[in-house]
Amino acid sequence: MAIDPKIQAAINQQINHEMTAAYNYLAMVVYFDQINLSGFAFWMRKQHEEELAHASKLFQYLSDRGGTVELQAIPKPSAQFDSVAHVFQAALAMEQANTASINSVYALAKEINDYATLSHLQWFLDEQVEEEKTMEETLGLIRFAADDKSALLTLNNQMANRPTEPDTTDA
Ligand SMILES: [Fe+2]
Ligand SMILES: [Fe+2]
């Protein structure tokens, strides 16, 4: 069944959201590089790559459904951060906004009984639960460390151990 033009537009917008998130995480890599927190920089680079993979997954889905991918402009990311906590607050807010965005695509697919899209979006809903949880937990640890620089450095070392996610594009 040909994909509904409204769903196609919503998925194209979601591709842009994922690319925008990827770009914002890359700006966070820049910040962490500048303050020499290489573990956080490494972690954020993985996060950047994950968001690229999300965009790619939606790209593939739209293409598989015979839809037309329309790439849109990616806004310039905010690169002004005052602290490590500030970065993770911004990351959490971005993930919460992305969850709302995926929910709205889901609601639209539900409205028009596009079961294939609902099925595909299930993975994204689960992923968003993980993403928000990770950002909240990390923000909690950063706040717990507060002004204790050695605690922050320990956390920085732990962030460097983030494993590479398995390739989800075939999932
Ligand atoms: Fe994402
Ligand atoms: Fe994300």
Image: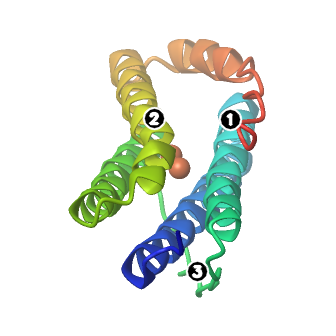
Is 100 displayed left or right of 95 in the figure? left
Tag 3: Cα neighbours inside 10 Å, few (<14), some, or many (≥20)?
some
Q: Nearer the viewer, residue 72 or 48?
A: 72
Q: Nearer the viewer, residue 111 or 31?
A: 111
Please name the amino acid that badge 2 sits on.
Glu
Q: Position of residue 20 (x, y in %)?
A: 55, 68
Residue 137 lies, with reference to residue 34, above or below; the image says above
Report the Cα–Cα distance between label 1 and label 2: 18 Å
Residue to which mark 1 is pinned: 171
Is 120 displayed left or right of 23 in the figure? left
Tag 2: Cα neighbours inside 10 Å, few (<14), some, or many (≥20)?
some
Q: Closer to the camera: disc 1 or disc 2?
A: 1
Q: Closer to the camera: disc 3 or disc 1?
A: 1
Q: Position of residue 69 (x, y in %)?
A: 65, 80
* Residue 83 in view of the camera: no
Report the Cα–Cα distance between label 2 and label 3: 21 Å
Can you tell which quarter of the image residue 161 is in?
top right
Q: What residue sits 75% from the left and 34% below the top? A: 38
Residue to which mark 3 is pinned: 74
Secondary structure found at label 3: loop
Closer to the N terminus: mark 1 or mark 2? 2
Q: What residue sits 43% from the left and 77% below the top? A: 4
Report the Cα–Cα distance between label 3 and label 1: 26 Å
Please name the amino acid that badge 1 sits on.
Ala
Q: Position of residue 113 (x, y in %)?
A: 30, 59
Closer to the N terminus: mark 2 or mark 3? 3
Tell me: is circle 2 under 8 Å from ligand 2: yes
Residue 6 lies, with reference to residue 119, above or below; the image says below
Secondary structure found at label 1: loop
Please name the amino acid that badge 3 sits on.
Ile
- As drawn, the label of residue 131 is 2
Q: What residue sits 60% from the left and 54% below the top? A: 25
